[in-house]
Amino acid sequence: MSQAPSHDSTLAQDVAGFCQQQVPDAQQSRASFPNSDLWAAVAKTGTGLWLDTGDVEAARALWTQEFVALTTNNSLLNNEVQKGIYDKLVPGTAKLLKDKGVTGNDVVQEVAFVLNAVHGLKLVRTFDADVSVELHTAISNDAEASYQYGKRFHAICPDRFIVKVPLTPAGLLAARRLSDDGIRLNFTLGFSARQNLLIASLAKPTWVNVFMGRIGAFIADNKLGDGKNAGEKATLASQRALRKLRDSGGPDVRQIGASIRNGEQVNDLLGLDVFTIPTGAAKGFVDLNPAADTIVDKTGNDPAVNFAAGIDADAEGLNCFWDVSAKFERAVAAAAALDANSASAADVLATLANNGAGDLFPQYSTDEAAKISSDGKIPVHAAWQERVKAGSASWDGTLTAAALASFTKDQNALDARISGLL
């Protein structure tokens, strides 16, 4: 989209009203759902409970009064849209948009926004829950568009929508502006304590993430080690960094454990600020049914990570997921001093590079970007090893790039379905 519609434009207001009209369902009450002694014990450790799904029936099978939110993303929304449940909504939305003067590819992007908002509203009404709704991947590097669409999501359901912003230089600036406007943010695609320290200090969102399952998979799939405890170690290190920042008078930013793979990970991270749990992992924890006296805060743990023989984790840059150096803290302080209303994404990159943290956002050639995309969620170690050693890339930054590329593929599939219905 050449220029994002302003959040206070007539178009934005008309689209917001249209979205609200599409979900006439009565608002359910959390009190109508059952209680769970197991999940209540988890909540008592200080952990907020979210389900990581857009599937209404899958969520309904697990939802109890102790759960407070659901997380959706481009991939999860695509899964629902591909079922055909919104096929009749697409033409009507397109007609509204065209009558308002929206043309070309802008129609598809606006329809995708509507589908995201409508599905989010359906989840709010069905589960009496907060719901994370995610920005279109096409605007991930556009700070102004991200700000405008974030404001538009918030206006549709200000008391329940949480806006998801991806980790890019532009995303950091947009998120800071949204945060300054009092909008709750779920800053996504984080993989390390140091990334989240930067996000918390500059963008000041409500929540940050560590996609823990993908860290373990990266180490295991590339035969760098067994992958066990890697994601957990990174998540706990990030939790501690955020608490240290908060205790020193910094922003109050909370940690989400994301990309949870099984019930054991839930058990190992009790006391984390928030779990966003895929339905399979949530069921796995219920089936695990740990003894009541073991359900305690475990955020003080620092589990060991076993690397394969011959792997020097420090030399390979693999400690980036949990280590935060004093040098990096100085880079964070410099970036946090930027004015989000006037700074550009280039300013963020330059500030980090000038302070020794230029590896955090690897810059890719066209061929390298295609390689990242084709390899999927888990980067191939050999493809980026030399760049990491040279300091022009990092493993946490590479995993973030791979995650955004993966979400972009699913967004493109959703957009293609929309286009086919127009």
Image (cartoon, grey):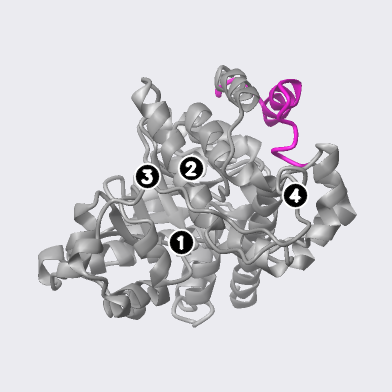
Q: What element carries label 3?
A: loop
Q: Which of the two discs, 3 and 1, sits closer to the camera?
A: 3
What amino acid type should be assigned to the residue bearing mark 2?
A: Ala
Find disc 1 in the rendering and name its residue.
Answer: 116
Find disc 2 in the rendering and name its residue.
Answer: 237
Contact between labelled residues 3 and 2, with CB atoms less than 8 Å apart: no
Q: How far apart are the two marked residues, 4 and 3, measured between alpha carbons?
A: 26 Å
Q: How far apart are the two marked residues, 1 and 2, measured between alpha carbons?
A: 32 Å
Find disc 4 in the rendering and name its residue.
Answer: 312
Contact between labelled residues 3 and 4, with CB atoms less than 8 Å apart: no
- In the rendered image, the quadrant that contains the C terminus is bottom right
Find disc 3 in the rendering and name its residue.
Answer: 300
Q: Label 2 crowding class (10 Å Cα cut-off): few <14, some 14-19, many 20+?
A: many
| Chain-order first, disc 3 or disc 1 | 1
| Numbered disc total | 4
Q: Which mark is residue 369?
A: none
Q: How far apart are the two marked residues, 4 and 1, measured between alpha carbons?
A: 44 Å
| Chain-order first, disc 2 or disc 4 | 2
Q: Which of the two discs, 1 and 2, sits closer to the camera?
A: 2
Q: Is mark 2 on a helix, strand or loop?
A: helix
Q: How far apart are the two marked residues, 2 and 3, measured between alpha carbons?
A: 9 Å
